[in-house]
Image (cartoon, rainbow, N blue to C red):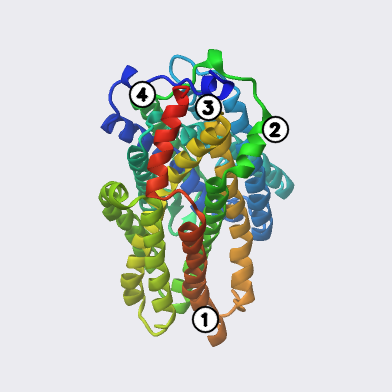
Amino acid sequence: MNQSAKQTNISTESEFRKFGMKDKFGYLFGDFGNDFFFILVSSFLMVFYTDIFHLNPAAVGGLFFIARLWDAVADVSWGRFIDTRKAGKNGKFRPWILRMSFPLVISGVLMFVQIPGMSNGFYTAFAYVTYILWGTLYSTVNIPYGSMASVITGDPVERTSLSSWRTLGANLAGLIINVVGPMILFVNNKVDANHFLLGAIIFGILAIACYLACYKLSIERITVNEADRPKVNLGKTLKGLVKNKPLLWILIASLSFMMCFMLIGAVNVYLFKDYFGNAKALSMVGLIQSAAVFVGMPMVKPLVAKFGKKELASAGLLLSVIVYGVLYFLPSLTATQFIAILSIAMFGYGLFNLVVWAFVTDVIDYHEYLTGLREDGTVYSIYSFSRKVGQALAGGIGGAAIAAVGYNPTLQGQAKDTLHGIHTLGTLVPAIVMFVIFLILTFLYPLNKKRTAQLAIDLAEKRKGN
């Protein structure tokens, strides 16, 4: 038996209980726990820094950009570290979720602590230290959690269901944060430091409960025989990553989608506040966005089984492209009419979101097929790196785009050209970006349904040493 075959001597899934609902709920709880703080931070940390710490918004934007780039480096570093660890009796990834969840939640609560009477310099330093600490610790939980999907089951369709349940967990956390959060955090329409701390503690306790549920309910079925594992070979890993075309194209597609998705979120605030004159409609947008995922989730597994992940994601993106294009040519719609049509686009790109994590498990398998190395953490962390870079870039692009169309916050009402520019940013730009992603998936990403099924067969044979 050669070294590659020996390295992929994998334990059989029959040694454990059959993959089922426990695993799906366990995986759901993982992202449920992650997003209690991730969405809290994304939605409300900036207003906490500006209104409680009295930091300059531009300085906060600089902090977010620097921290996101550092997070991207931390992701890859931690993924590489995980891949050098041996699996224990409870698996290779699950124990890290348990170990690091408590420090992660504590650091999350610290971000929302205000020490009264301190200087602006102190608050700036405190924000940098606590936010970057939280982001670093987030990597120590999120990287093993994301990597774990590829070892819970080896079946491509079952992995798609895990991706869907993960997305459901994130959406449930989003509903709670975006609906319940404002009720806790704000007093008389103003930011309250004590209430923010209370909210962080409540969401922290819920996050810990979710991480424990993830640890208890999930099982790592696919484990490498550590006695046969070759020494870490960074050169071989890098060579395999460069040759991994599915990974390279899904990285580009995912980075582009993350930038587009976050740009939509940033522009929608101005679109509804200034263009439609109805900021409250944003709550309905958030609700429908989550509802679109709930509607699409039961459809995903049978559609993937029939058509494939690549094919379903591409179709969903094309639907979104068409809808956003139509909205661009209908500038006279009311907010309600716009949202009604937009819901179709949200359903379309929701299908992409529901299967995107399953793409990652496929490219992890493809990396093993190319190199003989099972490096779930490394490959997943590189994927996470691309998303973090997308988030960092989107943070700067969103503000620059709004400024480029002439937005002036001191005016009672924006100029006609500015409103047209905001409408274009909210409709035509997403249509163009999503069309590019559609082209990447359709013509450049190689793992269609047939090739994914064949990969699973070839990999199983290779693991047996054939």
Q: Earlier in the sequence, mark 2 or mark 4?
A: 4
For mark 1, what is the residue? Answer: 419
- Whether residues under marks 1 and 3 lie with C-beta atoms below 8 angstroms apart, the answer is no
For mark 3, what is the residue? Answer: 100
Cα gap from disc 2 to disc 4, whole angstroms: 36 Å
Q: Earlier in the sequence, mark 2 or mark 1?
A: 2
Judge depth for marks 3 and 2 and give the one in front: 2
Q: Earlier in the sequence, mark 4 or mark 1?
A: 4
For mark 2, what is the residue? Answer: 235
Residue positioned 33% across, 26% down in the render: 217
Residue positioned 64% across, 68% down in the render: 400
Q: Earlier in the sequence, mark 1 or mark 3?
A: 3
- Residue type at mark 2? Gly
User: Within 10 Å of the Cα at label 1, are there few (<14), some (14-19), or many (20+) other Cα atoms?
Assistant: many
For mark 4, what is the residue? Answer: 216
> Where is residue 369 shown, x and y percent of the image?
51, 34
Q: Earlier in the sequence, mark 4 or mark 3?
A: 3
Query: Could you say which is closer to the camera, residue 21 or residue 181?
Result: 21
Q: Which mark is residue 379?
A: none
User: Within 10 Å of the Cα at label 4, are there few (<14), some (14-19), or many (20+) other Cα atoms?
Assistant: some
- Residue type at mark 4? Lys
Looking at the image, is 314 positioned above or below residue 106? below
- Residue type at mark 1? Leu
Looking at the image, is 66 positioned above or below residue 422? above
Q: Secondary structure at mark 1?
A: helix
Judge depth for marks 2 and 4 and give the one in front: 2
- Whether residues under marks 2 and 4 lie with C-beta atoms below 8 angstroms apart, the answer is no
Cα gap from disc 2 to disc 1, whole angstroms: 52 Å
Quarter where residue 417 is shown: bottom right
User: Within 10 Å of the Cα at label 2, are there few (<14), some (14-19), or many (20+) other Cα atoms?
Assistant: few
> Where is residue 450 shown, x and y percent of the image?
38, 47
Cα gap from disc 3 to disc 2, whole angstroms: 30 Å
